[in-house]
Image (tube, helix red, strand yellow):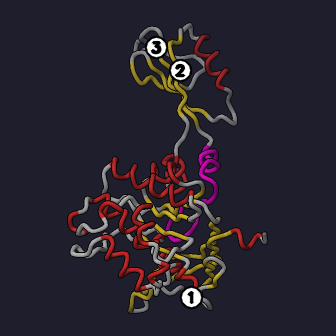
């Protein structure tokens, strides 16, 4: 396969400037370059106002770009915008549902908006895939919050797009519902759908995404596989529990450690420069007996804070 066909979305030099009037402009995007692999779960991370929504809205054809190139499922949006739009399903953060429509009616009307013939709708199949087959004829107003979220995903999938964009899908939901939605999203991805997830929940990105990009002030400041991103932060912690309590006046020789409780010390170090075995040897050199060692790896929050602190 030609390498160019391996990407669901390709973005080159994407810029967006908003005219605020009175010779005042705001540069929301400052030259974004991004490649999103097909069949991946790709995370777009950033604080509010970083530029995530602007990128998504340009991809979806809701906002006009100022400059750059955007290709969606091999369709350049400048020349084949209709095809590009048909390749995408968007699940917005807000719940946009008619409370007096049933899930069955909601998906039928949504299919009509996309011109999907009745014999191609496969609405029952979609209802089953989002776990709402038994609620097909219940009014949307009677559905739980989780069911409504899943119905929103169903609406986005009625025209069978190969790309699904979820904009902050779990914002404001409880932990149990979040886990349920994660499971639904993973099922869609297993079926071959490319998932693009915008979120500011770092736990969500770490759990869900196999690759991601971090947006800060209109620029991509980091991009790659999630596992590789975690490796970029050359920092690790050892939490060492000792057999006996240490007096507050105790001085550790040749060891940069912090006393965090009467019998626990924390050592922060760079794995590229220091071996854990050497640190443990230094503990014994201080005539201390170790009861337990807990190694703490950096998480995505550490990476995010490190990259966006300036």
The image quadrant of residue 40 is: bottom right
Dot 1 surroundings within 10 Å: few (below 14), some, or many (20 or more)? some
Disc number lying in front (1 or 3): 1
SS for tag 2?
A: strand
Which residue ends up furthest to the right in the rendered image?
2
Point out residue 53 in the picture as x, y percentages from the top left corner: 45, 72
Residue at (65, 34) in percent of width and height = 271
Numbered circle sitting on residue 250: 3
Is residue 63 one of those drawn in magenta? no
Q: CA–CA distance between discs 2 and 3?
A: 20 Å
The image quadrant of residue 168 is: bottom left
Numbered circle sitting on residue 293: 2
Numbered circle sitting on residue 81: 1
Dot 2 surroundings within 10 Å: few (below 14), some, or many (20 or more)? some
Above-or-below relation of 98 to 288: below
Q: CA–CA distance between discs 1 and 3?
A: 69 Å
Closer to the chain start, of discs 2 and 3, is 3
């Amino acid at each position: 396969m030609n390498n160019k066909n391996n990407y669901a979305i390709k973005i080159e030099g994407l810029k967006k400037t908003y005219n605020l009037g009175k010779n005042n402009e705001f540069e929301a995007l400052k030259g974004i370059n991004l490649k999103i692999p097909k069949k991946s779960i790709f995370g777009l991370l950033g604080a509010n106002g970083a530029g995530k929504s602007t990128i998504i809205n340009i991809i979806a054809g809701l906002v006009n770009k100022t400059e750059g190139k955007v290709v969606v499922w091999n369709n350049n949006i400048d020349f084949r915008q209709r095809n590009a739009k048909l390749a995408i399903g968007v699940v917005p953060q807000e719940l946009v549902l008619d409370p007096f429509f049933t899930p069955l009616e909601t998906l039928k009307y949504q299919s009509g908006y996309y011109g999907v013939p009745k014999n191609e709708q496969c609405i029952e199949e979609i209802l089953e895939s989002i776990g709402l087959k038994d609620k097909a004829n219940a009014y949307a107003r009677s559905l739980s919050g989780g069911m409504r979220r899943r119905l929103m995903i169903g609406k986005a999938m009625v025209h069978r797009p190969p790309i699904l964009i979820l904009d902050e899908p779990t914002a404001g939901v409880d932990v149990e519902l979040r886990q349920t939605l994660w499971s639904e999203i993973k099922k869609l991805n297993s079926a071959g759908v490319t998932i693009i997830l915008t979120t500011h929940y770092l736990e969500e990105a770490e759990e869900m995404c196999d690759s991601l990009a971090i947006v800060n002030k209109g620029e991509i400041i980091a991009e790659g596989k999630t596992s590789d991103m975690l490796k970029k932060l050359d920092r690790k912690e050892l939490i060492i529990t000792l057999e006996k309590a240490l007096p507050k006046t105790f001085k550790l020789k040749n060891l940069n450690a912090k006393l965090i409780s009467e019998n626990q010390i924390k050592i922060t170090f760079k794995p590229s420069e220091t071996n854990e075995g050497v640190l443990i040897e230094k503990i014994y050199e201080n005539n201390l007996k170790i009861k337990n060692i807990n190694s703490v790896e950096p998480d995505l929050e550490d990476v995010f804070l490190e990259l966006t602190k300036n």
